[in-house]
Amino acid sequence: MPNTRYIFITGGVASSLGKGVTIASIGALLEARGFKVTIQKMDPYINEDPGTMSPFQHGEVYVTEDGAETDLDLGYYERFTNSKLTKLNSITTGQIYKTVIERERQGEYQGRTVQVIPHITNEIKSRILKLKNADPELDFILVEIGGTVGDIESVPFLEAIRQFRFDNGREKTLYIHLTLVPTISVAGEIKTKPTQHSVKELLKQGIQPDILISRATKPLTPEIKWKISQFTNVPSDRVFSAADIDYTIYEVPLNLHQERIDDVIIQYFGMESVSPLFQGEMNPMLQKWEKIVDYFKNPATTVKIAIVGKYVEVSDAYRSLYEALWHGGFPHNCKVEYIKIDSEKITPENYKEYLSGIQGILVPGGFGNRGVEGKLISIRYARESKIPYFGICLGMQCAVIEYARNVLGLEGANSTEFNPDTPHPVIHIMDEQIGIDKMGGTTRKGAYPCQIQDNTRMEEAYEQKTIHERHRHRYEFNNLYLDQYLRKGLVVSGVSPDNKLVEAVELSRNNHPWFVGTQFHPEFQSKPHKPHPLFVKFIEAAIQYQKVNP
């Protein structure tokens, strides 16, 4: 049985330095050496999960197979590694305090005063150990502490991981601290002082980092690393550069490997690589990353995909979607440029200005009626102009609404989410959602099976009859209108095993080159080394459209 090791990563100086991508890349490097890993995120916010947070504030909500609504960093973890994440991989302050208070109410603390230490910190530590208990074969558990050192919200988590080393020993625990080493543009000088102060702040919490990773505009010189070492008590050969990338985040595992961080981690724990394939500078696993980067550097062709959504001004609101689009281009050696279009700005008078020169239109998920009419205009344009179209979740529902209004002739057709009094509720609330008034954690979410119909675009993409995809929605296709749709040419290409839920719709090959809508979110299962088949086919259709419409 493996002797599980624990790696903790914290961040300092500034937020958004890329802890998620960094720890996911370290996980990828450890997997390349033959080890089994999983990654856990500890978020200091008091929300139980990000499910009720606005995408404008928090970015996308990533959904795991077991239905946990999590931080978008878990998407990076799954895309970079082979780990299948669950609700155990996503921890928040809200979850911790809720559990402790429920135990207090049940008398489990036998009348003792409930305090941050030991009750909160013990609960945090127990969440790490639950991962090990769930999979005793794990070689490494990597834990990202959200937020920035110095934030008051992070203090209980930092204290918990400090205790974790005391409980489990230095030989089983490794602390990594990610900081910023800025360059003052006017003078062109690299400044180490922010990193020095960040480490001192971490030392106040009783944590001496074993490894420092420094975000910088360019690789750090040996002299700069030595200077950082002198002021942080971290040996200079454990101070690593994380220079700005040139093309894609998928360069990060290669850059960190070039810095030899995986060698240092293995040596720290006194381990040897499990994989016999790992020899010298590169192995087949890492060569896969090189191939991915090469797609970005030297694409054979480029297509432009319009993403018509309501959260496009926030770069992380559709993060998994952007990644999946890139993945879809890899098998075709095609670079995908996504054009972000605010659906609120699209009108019947200006839609061609926004949508000209593109080879595909994608309408993503979302909640609420803001911007829906702009989405409907875009979908009609895609349908009538034979432009490849991909609708996801709300994007499928909007396709159904547009078809009802402009093909079935059902004036005023809508979703009851947008208009409860619509004369034609072609999209309505799911039976299981009726009467639920709580917002958090109540949607239909997680992986569900779907039966694919014969001779459809769905069958062509998946090449199998039963699939499992992840959902996050409250509303569904209204089966009372199903016969009308079928008579007018809409193809229902995916249904739930009991035939009660329409999971996917499309237009036939005779009516459109590629027009598909799914109630589920395929972007959550796409990986750079295993692109999702629907995105692969969507980009293939965009390439073909470009050839016909240069």
Image: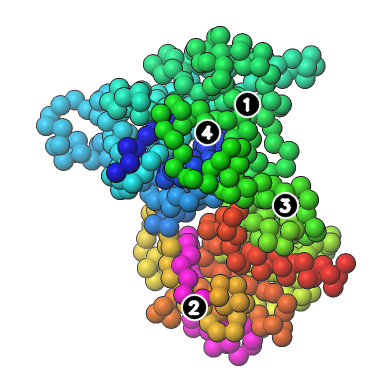
For the record, the magenta segment spans 464-492
Specify which label sits upstream in the sequence, 1 or 4.
1
Residue sitting nearer the eye, 328 or 150: 328
Q: Which residue is mark 3?
A: 295
From the viewer's perspective, is residue 446 above or below residue 440? below
**84 to the left or right of 537:** left
Q: Which residue is mark 2?
A: 465
The span from disc 2 to disc 3 (Cα, nearest Å) is: 31 Å
Q: Which residue is mark 1?
A: 241
In magenta stretch: residue 477: yes
Residue 457 percent coordinates (x, y): 62, 77
The span from disc 1 to disc 4 (Cα, nearest Å) is: 13 Å
| Element assignment for label 4 | helix
Residue sitting nearer the eye, 286 or 457: 286
Residue sitting nearer the eye, 36 or 329: 36
| Element assignment for label 1 | strand
Query: As shown in the figure, which amino acid type bears the numbered disc 2?
Result: Lys
Q: Are marks 4 and 3 in contact (CB under 8 Å)?
A: no
Specify which label sits upstream in the sequence, 4 or 3.
4
Query: As shown in the figure, which amino acid type bears the numbered disc 4?
Result: Asp
Q: Is residue 539 visible?
A: yes
Specify which label sits upstream in the sequence, 2 or 3.
3
Q: Which residue is mark 4?
A: 262
View extreme (bottom): residue: 487
| Element assignment for label 2 | loop
